[in-house]
Image: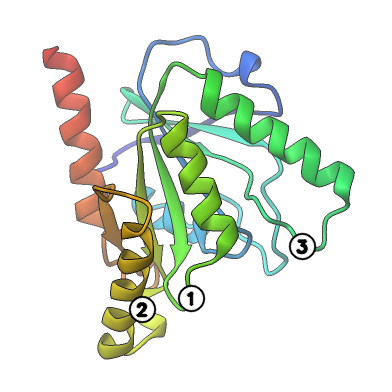
C-alpha cells in the first residue's frame, strides 16, 4: 500500500470528540523521544505531518490523520515523562487510557520501542496492561540504524526473551529506521491486510 493522501483532521484531549466515523484507526504510541513523529512522517511520505521536536513530550493531544480516504492514523501522547509533574502525568494517563479502552474504532495499537535500550519496566507494564485489556497491539522497534546489525540482533533477542517470560505468544513485531526508511513496507502491508479483512468480513 502507498499512502497517497494524508490529511490532518483534528487534535483533542477527549476520545469522545474524535471523528464520528466507523473507519478503522491505527494508533501509534511510545515513550518520549522514541521517534514516533519521524516514523509517522516516513510512513506518510510527509516531512512534517507529525511535528518533530528536540524536546521530548511534544505530543500532548490525540491527533487524527485521514489516510487515503479510507482509514485514520492516530498519533497518541507518549507515556512515562520523567520531567512532567504528577498532575500532568495523571492527565496524560487518562487521555491515553480512555482512548485505548473506549474508542471502538481502534483497530491496532503500534507500541514503539527504542531498540537501543534494555527492556524497560514501564514499556513491559504498559504492554501487560494492553494484553489484560484485550487491546490488539504490535511492537515497533525504532532507530534500527543506530546500532550495528550484531548489537541490534542481540538487543531484539533479549527483548523477546524478556517478553516470553509473561507472554505465551508474542504480538507482531516490526523493525524500523526512519532515517533509512526501513520497515515502511512491512508496516503498511500489515495495515492494508487488516483493512482488507475488515472489508471482507
- With 83 as the anchor, is 49 left or right in this view? left
Q: Residue placed at 28% from the left, 47% from the top? A: 171
Whether residue 49 appears in this view of the structure is: no
For residue 196, the mark is none
Mark 1–mark 3 distance (CA, rounded to whole Å): 17 Å
Mark 3–mark 2 distance (CA, rounded to whole Å): 24 Å
Classify 192 as above or below 106: below
Q: How is the image coloured?
A: rainbow
Q: Residue placed at 21% from the left, 42% from the top? A: 190
Q: Secondary structure at mark 1?
A: loop
Which percent across, then down, holds residue 172? 25, 49
Q: Secondary structure at mark 2?
A: helix
Give the quarter of the figure containing the C terminus. top left
Give the quarter of the figure containing the N terminus. top left
Q: Which residue is mark 3?
A: 82
Which percent across, then down, holds residue 120? 54, 66
Query: Which one is nearer the viewer's eye here, 55 or 168?
Result: 168
For residue 155, the mark is 2
- With 40 as the anchor, is 79 left or right in this view? right
Q: Which residue is mark 1?
A: 118
Q: Which of the 4 quarters of the picture holds residue 99? A: top right
The mark that comes first in sequence, 1 or 2, is 1
Do the residues under discs 1 and 2 have CB atoms within 8 angstroms? yes
Q: Secondary structure at mark 3?
A: loop
Which percent across, then down, holds residue 115? 42, 72
- With 29 as the anchor, is 90 left or right in this view? right
Q: Residue placed at 45% from the left, 33% from the top? A: 132
Amino acid at each position: 500500500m502507498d499512502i497517497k493522501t494524508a490529511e490532518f483532521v483534528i487534535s483533542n484531549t477527549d476520545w469522545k470528540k474524535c471523528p464520528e466515523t466507523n473507519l478503522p484507526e491505527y494508533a501509534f504510541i511510545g515513550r518520549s523521544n522514541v521517534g514516533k513523529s519521524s516514523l509517522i512522517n516516513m510512513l506518510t511520505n510527509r516531512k512534517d505531518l507529525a511535528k518533530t521536536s528536540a524536546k521530548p513530550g511534544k505530543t500532548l493531544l490525540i491527533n487524527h490523520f485521514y489516510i487515503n480516504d479510507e482509514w485514520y492514523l492516530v498519533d497518541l501522547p507518549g507515556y512515562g515523562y520523567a520531567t512532567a509533574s504528577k498532575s500532568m502525568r495523571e492527565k496524560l494517563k487518562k487521555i491515553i487510557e480512555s482512548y485505548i479502552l473506549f474508542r471502538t474504532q481502534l483497530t491496532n495499537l503500534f507500541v514503539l520501542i527504542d531498540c537501543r535500550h534494555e527492556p524497560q519496566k514501564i514499556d513491559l507494564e504498559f504492554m501487560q496492561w494492553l494484553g489484560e485489556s484485550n487491546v490488539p497491539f504490535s511492537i515497533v522497534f525504532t532507530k534500527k540504524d543506530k546500532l550495528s546489525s550484531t548489537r541490534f540482533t542481540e538487543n531484539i533477542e533479549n527483548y523477546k526473551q524478556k517478553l516470553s517470560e509473561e507472554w505465551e505468544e508474542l504480538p507482531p513485531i516490526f523493525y524500523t529506521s526512519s532515517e533509512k526508511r526501513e520497515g515502511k513496507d512491512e508496516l503498511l502491508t500489515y495495515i492494508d491486510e487488516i483493512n482488507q479483512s475488515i472489508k471482507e468480513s
